[in-house]
Amino acid sequence: MTKRNLETAENAKNLKRVSIDPVTRVEGHGRVTLLLDEAGKIHQVRLHIVEFRGFEKFIQGHPYWEVPVLVQRLCGICPVSHHLAAGKAIDMLVGARQLTPTAEKLRRLMHVGQMLQSHALHFFHLASPDLLFGFDDDVVHRNVVGVIAAHPDLAVQGVKLRKFGQQVIEHIAGKRIHGTAALPGGMNKPLSAASRESMLQEIGQIIEWSRGAVALTRKVFESSEEHSKNFAVFRSNFLGLIGPGGELEFYDGGLRARDADGGMIFDQIDATHYNRYIREEVKSWSYMKFPFLISLGADDGWYRVGPLARVNNCDRISTPLAEAERLAFRSYAAGMQHATLAYHWARMIEMLHAAEEIERLLNDPDILGTDLMAPPGQRLAEGIGVIEAPRGTLFHHYRVNEDDVVEKANLIVSTTNNNQAMNEAIRSVAARYLDGRSLTEGMLNRIEVAIRAYDPCLSCATHALGKMPLTVDLVDPDGTLVDRMVRDGEGSIVCSPSDG
Amino acid sequence: MSEPSIVVFGWGNPSRGDDALGLLLLDWLRQQPMIDDASISFVEGYQLQIEHALDLLQASQALFIDAHASCEPPFLFTQVIPTADVSYTSHALSPEALLFVCEQISHRTAPPSFSLGVRGERFDLGSPPTEAALSHLEQAKRFLAQLLASSSPENWSSLAKLNVRGG
């Protein structure tokens, strides 16, 4: 496991205490602070993403049956994931965890539709190689641009893939964002034959484009091999849901954690027992918590979630085309893949699996069934729902009182699960690329590339205009701001003290 | 008004305080008697994303309405120029980045586009819009009515160059 030697400065007595309050200083969505010593060497690197706050207050006091609809309003990016995770939690609450075959398959279909449309965004952004890979080596850059230029329809395909995924959601939930579908113990309406036919007409093309996306991402990764294998690389544990046979699983399964060498830490854990295995650490310098595996402790128990974790973690993928790609991915790494940029490759493998799974579900006779509701069982006081959202494992945990009102809610979202990993990625970039006492645009690019691979969901953030995307601060031992770099929404560098 | 066609985007999270301003203004606009439905289309959502470029393809002009976190109150009206997305997440697109996507997929110049940002003050989850923001909203409504009374791109461009900030 990577030693976290840049999280907190050693010999802090020799450095002036710098208090950076994320509450008052974060004006945009995120901030990176880099602390130097007198020799100009980096001693501390921290990433502050705007914390996912306020949800407990938002949800408490509401009757439990409102929760699956309410949680969709937390975020417009992955409302389906929150809706389904909350739905699973409420299933448990009402004693109806075993859904009817049709209800479960409709939820799965909705979920892979969400996965497809979310991952398609990254495929789209392949059209902008600098954005994803941030090269400033001319030769490597030309290689990558050449690979992508040979695919002029990349942008259009990305938009159409995304639109298809949203249409899958809309066919089931009635709206592409914030529709209603999951009820306690089931679903609220069946899928029509016309809707199924409409999706089946397009799915062949969707699968072909998804295959192309994997091939392209792999080619880009390989054409910049030295960079891809060394950029923000660090070893970590991995966590995610797994199917009963060890297969890749998005909707429901047991929890599996592997160590950096692929050894099993735990496997097929009942996900509703997550808090016996995972704890959240609070650090003074961040509102966002740091989850870790209890058995390994806070220092060594942090982990990664999301596409790289899932593809690393699973033993197989249940759909044939994606499974072939997974084998090639694992063969390339010759073991566990730890490169940050491999997230993009793994993400496209998952997108292909989602497309194949959509086809499989649409051809399943149960998908048009009308038996949608499981009978309630024993009412419990707590409900827990765990799901693999596009960005990683998502935990919803509610406690409900005798009046059916939510008393307590705890959510661990994907971005929080990846909090330590994003910090490690930034530290790796800073240690390797910071030269002297000035921030450069190249350094800013690389920081953004590293964060982008994890694609944090800023679900707590407003999307108002005029919010600075990311601020990078360089601070010397006196607490003086040495340099600052901010790229605004228009791509301009907004402020940089070293410019004078 | 019957031509040209204008697409109006309004977005934000209605559960997050002043983030609701864009949607509130869009809702108000939809209900105005001055609106010729055939010539204006409305698109709403939580955030702008790549698929919204498809809504721009048939438009001859676009207006983006959102809360603004840092402009001088009560609002800011500007012209939007297509710019490649440089954000560090794929979480949302700026209007500039959306126009760039439109050009990428259509291989044509994006329609003349403008942004009306209404100053918001607080964006806490579960909170209603603030009184100050609602006051800014009222002023923005009056400005928006003037915009639509003379909706040529040339007129809007002139207003944007003046860096209209309301009042």
Image (cartoon, coloured by chain):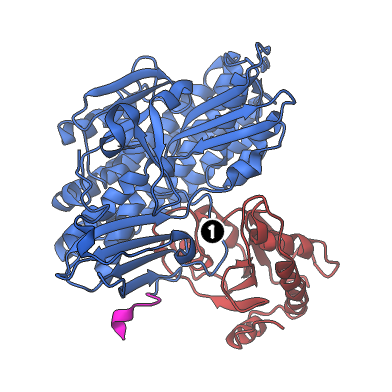
| Secondary structure state at the residue bearing disc 1 | helix
Residue A117 vertical placement versus A388 (above, below): below
Q: Check the rendered structure and report the hue given to chain B.
A: red
Q: Which residues are magenta?
A: A493-500
Which residue occupies 20% across, 42% down? A2
- Chain painted in blue in the figure: A
Chain of the residue under label 1 = B
Q: Whole-percent x and y of residue A99?
A: 59, 15
Magenta region, main secondary structure:
loop
**Residue A145 falls in image quadrant:** bottom left
Q: What amino acid is found at the position of numbered circle 1 in the picture?
A: Ala
Magenta highlight on residue A497 = yes
Picture quadrant of residue B74: bottom right
* Camera-nearest residue between A272 and A486: A272
Residue at 54% x, 48% y is: A53
| Magenta stretch: includes residue B89 | no
Which residue is denoted by mark 1 in the rendering? B53
Please indicate, yes or no, whether residue A335 appears anywhere in the rendered image: yes
Residue at left offset 66%, top offset 61%: B18
